[in-house]
Amino acid sequence: MQYENEHIEYKSQMIDDVYKEVIAFANTDGGIIYIGIDDQGNLIGIENVDETYTRLTNGIRDAIAPDVTMFVRYILQDNNVIRIEVGEGSYKPYYLKAKGIKPTGVYVRQGASSVPASPDQIRRMIKDYDGDIFEEMRALTQELSFEEAERTFKRYGVDFSEEKYIALGLRNIHDDQYANLAMILSDQCQHTTKIAVFGDETNITFKDAKEFGGSIFKQLDDSYAYLTLCNRTAATFKGLERIERSDYPEDALREALLNALIHRDYSYSGSIIINVNDSCMEFISIGGLLPGLSADDIRNGISQPRNRKLAEIFHRLKLIESYGTGIRKIYARYRDCTEQPRIEVTPNTFKLVLPNMNANGVITENIQEATETPRVLITPQMKTVIDYLTEYGEMTDEDMQELLNIKKTRSYLLARQMNENGLIDIVGRGAAKKYKLVLNKNA
């Protein structure tokens, strides 16, 4: 009788531990398991062969994913030993359903032992057997929820029932497991978007910083709302004519943010970085251009999406029109500016720089020369609040939240910023707190 080795495993009796041996052989080079022989190779035998055989076959079918039964063969020897021949599987990694695709559920054969696979081994197996498209690979985490995605799909009138998961690309057709695309859309998404506001053009002096996580849809909403707060409006006068111009076109901000979220390389764990200073906004996403594309190609509207299914979902929600149009829109909005947006590419990053249209030298028509009136900087949300207060005289926190469709925290931050800028007065405290317009302010 042979000793245990990388292809042979002995079990004196049927225990659940046998499932990890089946998994290990299927994830490696295959092997044979004997039930009814002890670790030293001594014949022990099985008392109730029929009951053991039934429990064994049912357990291997029910406890292991994906379905490994096509690679398993059972042979009864001497009427009291079950020989289990396990072939190398064709859809690795195989794992315990109760544990999921993680080291506690995935095993490989190492010498005469079956040991937990390392995270790198698991990722390598997924890449080798699912292909090299990250959004289509099986997600390492299968415990996912989609509250934010459900709200977003409902908002845009698109069905997000579980019956649509495979068609959308959230589940794979092989074993109904979640793909990485599902992880990106889920509330458990591990990727984040970081926004930093600096007081200097070298991006050294921090003024504020935020990190937004959760579903990519939540990151989109939260990041855009914060960037809107950062997008000041310059109000000047030509004679009696009031002229307002935002630092950045709103649709340019939107397209730049969408581009960063949709086209970043999610196989890397790093965050999207957005830097804001008085001269520009920088949108930096992980992952350079796909092979065959250049920065000039991108400027001309040529697009090859890295995350095709993710882009299709955003297109289905009408958040984007079609591939390549977003960058063209951005350049169109800067058509009359002396300083144009810039695209900077490295092997692992893509940076889109939007110049501040109110910074010196950016706008072709220098509207500041027509007046000596000091520039008052307000955002579109601030203007909406000012217009409301001009009409109604005062407002509460609840009024502001409903007017701007924002949450309580964002309402508080906006009110504080407007108060610090001398635009509104805060009267009272707590539930009695109200906001009023500061008199004699050019808003």
Image (tube, rainbow, N blue to C red):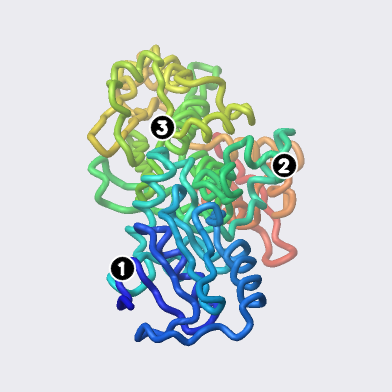
60, above or below 276, in the image? below
| Residue bearing mark 3 | 306
Say what amino acid the circle numbered 2 marks: Glu
Q: Nearer the viewer, mark 2 or mark 3?
A: 2
Circle nearer the N terminus (1, 3): 1
Circle nearer the N terminus (2, 1): 1
251, above or below 67, in the image? above
| Residue bearing mark 2 | 163
279, above or below 4, in the image? above
Most extreme residue toward the front, as rendered? 78
- Residues packed near mark 3 inside 10 Å, few (<14), some (14 to 19) or many (20 plus): some
Say what amino acid the circle numbered 1 marks: Glu
Residue at horizontal 39%, vertical 63%? 31
Give the image location of residue 288, x and y in percent: 29, 34
The image's mark for residue 242 is none
Marks 2 and 3, Cα distance to the nearest angstrom? 25 Å
Marks 1 and 3, Cα distance to the nearest angstrom? 40 Å
Is any atom of residue 403 visible in this view?
yes
Q: Quadrant of residue 225?
A: top right
| Residue bearing mark 1 | 6
23, above or below 238, in the image? below
Residue at horizontal 41%, vertical 78%? 10
Is any atom of residue 234 visible in this view?
no
Asked if the residues shown at circle 2 and circle 3 are in contact, with their CB atoms under 8 angstroms apart, the answer is no
- Residues packed near mark 2 inside 10 Å, few (<14), some (14 to 19) or many (20 plus): few
For the residue pair 388 and 167, the one nearer the viewer reads as: 167
Give the image location of residue 240, x and y in percent: 55, 18
Residue at horizontal 52%, vertical 59%? 73
Marks 2 and 1, Cα distance to the nearest angstrom? 42 Å
